[in-house]
Amino acid sequence: MFKKLSMYLLISLMILSLAAVVGCSSQTDNGAGPDKEQAEKEQPKEEAKPEKEVISFAGSGGYPPFNFVNEKDEVVGFDVDVANEIATRLGMDMKYVTTAWDGIIEGLRAKRYDGILGSMAITEDREKQVDFSIPYYYSGAQLIVMKDSDIKTPDDLTAESVIGVATGTTFADDVEKLGAQARTYEDDFQTLMELQNGRLAGVITDRVVGLNAIKEIKNGDRLTLAGKLLRQETMGIAFHSDDDELREKVDAILEEMHQDGTLTEISAKWFDGEDITKQ
């Protein structure tokens, strides 16, 4: 009995030893084991590429062809292209924020975005709240009426004339100077629709916006420009008053874009070859 047990133990030990040898050999053949694990630990890990910083610019998103939402729900336009080019030259990604125009300066002062690049005219009142870049384009205030209107020039307006303007713009001041009544709307799409519906005697907006509306909006061919520019406007990018470093960098880039023709190219793209970037 004892001899049989001894024999069984001896055979079991031999089987266990053989299994251990095969197991070690298998690990070695597969390239696993402590040596490989150590080698893997010693391999330098590829460092993740740092994400680009983001610069954010704001506009109303309802001001074609400067900044507006297209059929793909993308914000596009002259202002957006200028913003993208500035971001590229800064080595940054660009985020374009759309927000109500009447609160856009307060949003900048609260630092919800880095700048306002939305066709904002440089005025003394605004310069008390924000700092502006050098000009990036020039335009002016224009009266628009229906072609069959009795109003042919701004001098034809009366105290009873109701003129539509976008809220938060400087155009309400023009209406007041002309002795007419200003009625404000969220954007120029609404003002021009109200004009076509007969609820307004006219609209005062940016001349380029007016020309674009005549070409692009439904029944735009019923509209016409009444007289010459009421005044010229100079457009700049607004920055928070304590962000001199960014403003100075953007000024240098805008100067480059004026000199190398980039602003002229962007203007030609959106305005049928017309250059609105030169005074």
Image: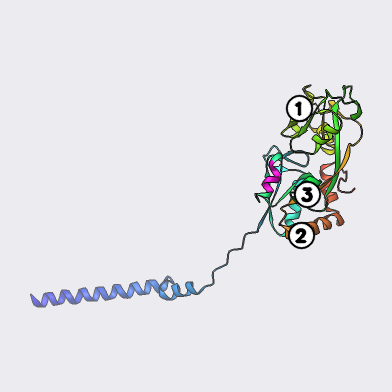
User: The N terminus appears in which quarter of the rendering?
Assistant: bottom left
**Which SS class for mark 2?**
helix
Residue at point 28%, 75% (across, down)? 18
Number of dots carrying numbers: 3
Q: Amino acid at mark 2?
A: Lys
The amino acid type of the residue labelled 3 equals Glu
Magenta region, mostly helix, strand or loop? helix
Looking at the picture, how far across and down is residue 192, in whole percent?
A: 78, 29
Which of the two labelled residues, at mark 1 and mark 3, occupies the earlier sequence position? Answer: 3
Q: Which residue is mark 3?
A: 127
Left or right: 182 as drawn, with respect to 109:
right
Which disc, if any, is residue 233? Answer: none
The answer to which quarter of the image holds residue 196 is top right
Q: In front of the other: label 1 or label 3?
A: 3
Q: Which percent across, then down, holds residue 188?
A: 76, 33
Contact, CB < 8 Å: mark 1 with mark 2?
Answer: no
Vertical relation: 232 (above or below) 260: above
Q: Residue at x 77, y 46 (%)?
A: 126
Could you tell me if the residues under marks 3 and 2 are in contact, i.e. CB atoms within 8 Å? no
* Residue at 25% over, 73% down: 15
195 drawn magenta: no
Residue drawn at (86%, 32%), measured in percent from left and top? 143
The picture quadrant where one finds residue 49 is bottom right
Q: CA distance from mark 1 to mark 2?
A: 40 Å
Front residue of 178 and 229: 178
Give the class, few, some or many, for how many residues have Cα within 10 Å of label 3's Cα (few <14, many ≥20).
Answer: few
x%, y% of residue 111?
66, 51
Q: From the viewer's perspective, tell me whether residue 19 is left or right of residue 221.
A: left
Magenta residues (range)? 103-108
Circle 2 is placed at which residue position?
249
Which residue, given by chain and number where applicable, does mark 1 sit on? Answer: 193
